[in-house]
Amino acid sequence: MSSKVILTGDRPTGRLHIGHYVGSLRGRVEIQNAMDYKDMFVFIADAQALTDNFDNPEKVRQNIIEVALDYLSVGLDPNKITIFVQSMIPELTELAFYYMNLVTVARLQRNPTVKSEIQMRGFSKADRAEGKEQGTGSMKQGVVNPVQKQDASEGSSGHGEDNQPVFGSGLPVGFFTYPISQAADITAFKATTVPAGEDQKPMIEQTVEIVRKFNSIYGQTLVEPDILLPSNSACLRLPGTDGKAKMSKSLGNCIYLSESAEEVNKKVMGMYTDPLHISINDPGHIEGNTVFTYLDAFCRQEHFGLYLPEYASLDELKAHYQRGGLGDVKIKKFLGKILNQELEPIRERRKEFEKDIPEVYNMLQKGSRKAREVAASTMDDVRRAMKINYFEDKQLIAEQAERFKQQKH
Ligand code: ATP
Ligand code: MG
């Protein structure tokens, strides 16, 4: 049997979208169904979502059930794996507190994902965390391109585009330190494998460093995880329908898994393609063309026979577009059909699960109970390793008793 322990999570900041699907969900379902694991955990990261939505707890509360329904509808099965809610496991917070000792401020500041997210959320402005700006959860669409920002901030001037320091005085400590809390989530379950999108790479690297430092100081206790990225490069960081940033709940540039066929078609028709491809006969560009990126992520050979028999393959379709003579509408219609074929069974399953919402909460509660047992057992190991298990340590009590007996009064 496989010795892999799989763990992944999603923030309940909105319904899940096709970026989640290709970046992580699809891979999770494959692993689950191949039974290629010893244990598998999938969790709803509500505590993490609160780090940047602390002023909007209702948003997080509403989206827990949405994410749970998305999980069930893509085929994650609570009879095979454990699905739980992060905040129900207090051991995760406890672990994170001890891990904070093992990470420097400078190290956190080097995390490119956190840097770009801070800018995206406007946390670099001094007045941001004081609530002078409204609505953490309601980021305006396309404010910043996190991909570009990430590159821009690599130069390490420590300042953003508006010349505000990235780690300005308005940055909440909770958000700044969320990679540490993520390390706690992963290690509490002794996860070996984390299926996730590319934006999670710096988090896993941070986790590995914490594990190594912990084990070197306190003795071999924690397990080093590995990220499992999608093998298809178009799926590493699926762009939004606007073609700019990564598709992200917080940016509103998403096609949601639960969207109707009409909504999907409408969004596909409005998608960003190649601004230089003005008339059909103009040669078109594939790179940076979101429709082709989505085709790379979703198109399979069978789709040509079904929906576009005049082409033999995606390469042939791309070649025609590059030569000129192939219109955007045609490729968009093709993409719409492919997406709807993939999403239809997901929508249908969702409708079934929506019929019994109390049962979905029940499932989450049961999963959370089981997850808590596992995390508590790791916490016991951690306490023992860190020598903070005073009451369970009979030898310590006996030694102290002896020491005080021998003291002269
Ligand atoms: P938020 O805007 O609140 O951060 P999000 O849309 O980025 O939401 P997360 O919950 O942060 O979603 O991410 C959950 C998982 O989905 C992670 O493994 C992440 O790498 C993956 N993921 C999210 N967006 C994409 C994307 N556009 N392409 C590929 N993977 C993605
Ligand atoms: Mg995210």
Image (cartoon, rainbow, N blue to C red):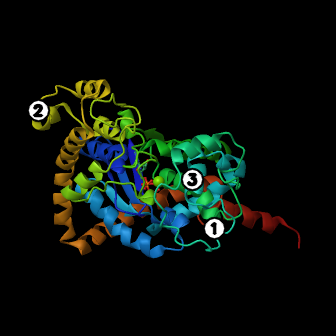
In the rendered structure, find residue 128 and report the number of the disc placed on it: 1
Q: Is residue 227 left or right of residue 305?
A: right
- In the rendering, at what x and y percent does residue 292 appear? 32, 36
Q: CA distance from mark 2 to mark 1?
A: 53 Å
Q: Nearer the viewer, mark 3 or mark 2?
A: 2
Quadrant of residue 397 within the rendered picture? bottom right
Res 147 visible = yes
Mark in the foreground, 3 or 1: 1
Distance from Cα at disc 3 to Cα at disc 2: 45 Å
Q: For the N terminus, give its image quadrant.
A: top left
Q: Position of residue 305 (x, y in %)?
A: 11, 32
Q: Cβ(mark 3) to ligand 2 < 8 Å? A: no
Residue 179 is tagged as 3
Label 3 SS = helix
Quarter of the picture containing the C terminus is: bottom right
In the image, residue 302 above or below residue 62: above
The quarter of the displayed image where residue 64 is located: bottom left
Circle 2 crowding by C-alpha within 10 Å: few under 14, some 14–19, many from 20: few
Tag 2, which secondary structure? helix
Rendered location of residue 191, percent (x, y): 45, 47
Q: Amino acid at mark 1?
A: Arg
Q: Is residue 135 left or right of residue 270?
A: right
Q: Nearer the viewer, residue 270 or 377?
A: 270
- Helix, strand or loop for disc 1: loop
Closer to the N terminus: mark 3 or mark 1? 1
Residue that appears at 67% across and 69% down: 127
The mark that comes first in sequence, 3 or 2, is: 3
Three-letter code for the amino acid on which mark 2 is drawn: Gly
Residue placed under numbered mark 2 in the picture: 305
Q: Nearer the viewer, residue 384 or 339?
A: 339
Distance Cα–Cα, label 3 vs label 1: 21 Å
